[in-house]
Image (tube, rainbow, N blue to C red):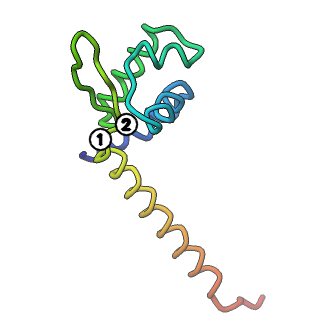
């Protein structure tokens, strides 16, 4: 996943419906109809959200007869996790640097 895909991954997860879909897919793979039945949005809306998640590299699909089964893309989620870990490490280092500065006297 390149930088543009991972940035779009973060933006993609900013939508509550897409986060709900990701949470469902974290439990197990689902077909569109199964997801729509468990969410307060229409089947066409679920399909649109899945397309956005797939384009961001967070979800992958496979054919199972006439259905498409969606699952989380581990590589895409790992890339987001790596970015979050990097951000968190930098934030902690910055905090440590500020906390360890000698006090300035006026």
Q: Residue 51 in the image: state x and y as whole percent.
A: 33, 21
Q: Residue 99 in the image: state x and y as whole percent.
A: 65, 82
Q: Which residue is mark 1?
A: 4
Residue placed farthest to the front in the image? 65
Say which of 51 and 39 sits in front. 39
Quarter of the image with the C terminus is bottom right
Kindly indicate whether the residue at mark 1 contacts the one at mark 2 (C-beta within 8 angstroms).
yes
Say which of 36 and 56 sits in front. 36
Say which of 61 and 14 sits in front. 61
| Occupied quadrant, residue 38 | top right
Residue 105: which disc? Answer: none
User: What's the residue at 60%, 74% (across, down)?
Assistant: 95
Figure check: 13 above or below 105: above
Quarter of the image with the N terminus is top left
Would residue 12 be found to the left or right of residue 76 on screen? right
Figure check: 11 above or below 67: below
Q: Residue 37 in the image: state x and y as whole percent.
A: 52, 13
Label 2: state its secondary structure. helix
Is disc 2 surrounded by few (<14), some (14 to 19) or many (20+) residues within 10 Å? some
Is disc 1 surrounded by few (<14), some (14 to 19) or many (20+) residues within 10 Å? few
Label 1: state its secondary structure. helix
Q: Which residue is mark 2?
A: 8
Figure label count? 2
Residue placed farthest to the right in the image? 106
| Occupied quadrant, residue 73 | top left
Disc 2 to disc 1, C-alpha distance: 6 Å
Q: Residue 19 in the image: state x and y as whole percent.
A: 51, 32
User: What's the residue at 76%, 91% (across, down)?
Assistant: 105
User: What's the residue at 58%, 80% (across, down)?
Assistant: 96
Would residue 88 be found to the left or right of residue 28 on screen? right
């Amino acid at each position: 996943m390149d930088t543009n895909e991972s940035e779009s991954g973060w933006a993609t997860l900013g939508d509550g419906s897409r986060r709900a879909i990701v949470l469902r897919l974290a439990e197990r793979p689902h077909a569109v109809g199964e997801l729509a039945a468990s969410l307060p949005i229409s089947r066409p809306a679920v399909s649109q959200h899945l397309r956005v998640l797939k384009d961001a590299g967070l979800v992958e699909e496979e054919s199972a007869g006439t259905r498409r089964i969606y699952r989380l893309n581990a590589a895409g989620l790992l890339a987001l996790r790596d970015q979050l870990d990097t951000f968190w490490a930098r934030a902690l280092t910055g905090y440590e640097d500020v906390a360890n500065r000698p006090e300035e006297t006026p």
